[in-house]
Amino acid sequence: MAGLPGRSGGWNRLSVEDHQLRGTYRKDRHGQAQEPPSDSYSRADRRRLLIGLPRGARRLAIALLETFGGWDPASLATLRAYSLSCERLIARCNGDYVCAQRDGHAVALPLSIMW
């Protein structure tokens, strides 16, 4: 049963050889663990990411770049969009919402759930 110590799996784990003999071997599940990708962005990529961002979005993007690794061009584009959306969320909040920023993340909560 899931969540119970000693009963949540692992005791019936098969070796790679057993999976191959049974015909249940899947490289994506049973193959070697892959190491996370290294940072593959240049200073120019970082500059392009940060250029034109408002101050709050820029601070958030820098914090995430320094905290996490494995940035490729697609994830840098996603980071830029995420940072901008957080900045827009904060700017858009009006009397109907309570805006908060926690650990660099923007949060907007409707007042109806607050009271």
Image (cartoon, rainbow, N blue to C red):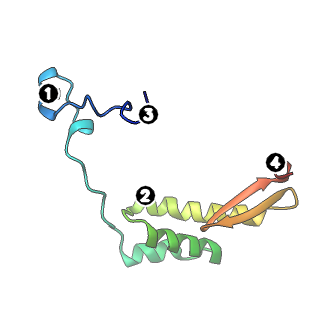
Please give the name of the residue rendered at 61% of the width and 71% of the height, measured from the top-left corner. Answer: 57
Closer to us: 44 or 108: 108
Q: Are marks 3 and 4 in contact (CB under 8 Å)?
A: no
Which quadrant holds residue 103? bottom right
Q: Is 25 left, or right, of 48 in this rendering?
A: left
Q: Amino acid at mark 3?
A: Leu
Where is the N terminus found, in terms of image quarters?
A: top left
**Looking at the image, which residue is at 44% across and 73% down?**
66
Residue type at mark 1? Answer: Asp
Tell us which disc is closer to us: 3 or 1. Answer: 3
The percent coordinates of residue 39 (x first, y second) are 33, 67
Measuring 57% from the left and 61% from the top, which residue is drawn there? Answer: 81
* Vertical placement of residue 88 versus 18, above or below: below
Q: Secondary structure at mark 4?
A: helix
* Distance (Cα) linking label 3 and label 4: 34 Å
- The mark that comes first in sequence, 3 or 4, is 3
Check disc 3 and report the residue beneath it. 4
Which numbered circle lies on residue 94? none
Residue to which mark 4 is pinned: 113
At horizontal 30% and vertical 57% (from top left) the residue drawn is 36
Image-quadrant location for residue 38: bottom left
Disc 1 and disc 4: Cα gap in Å?
Answer: 53 Å
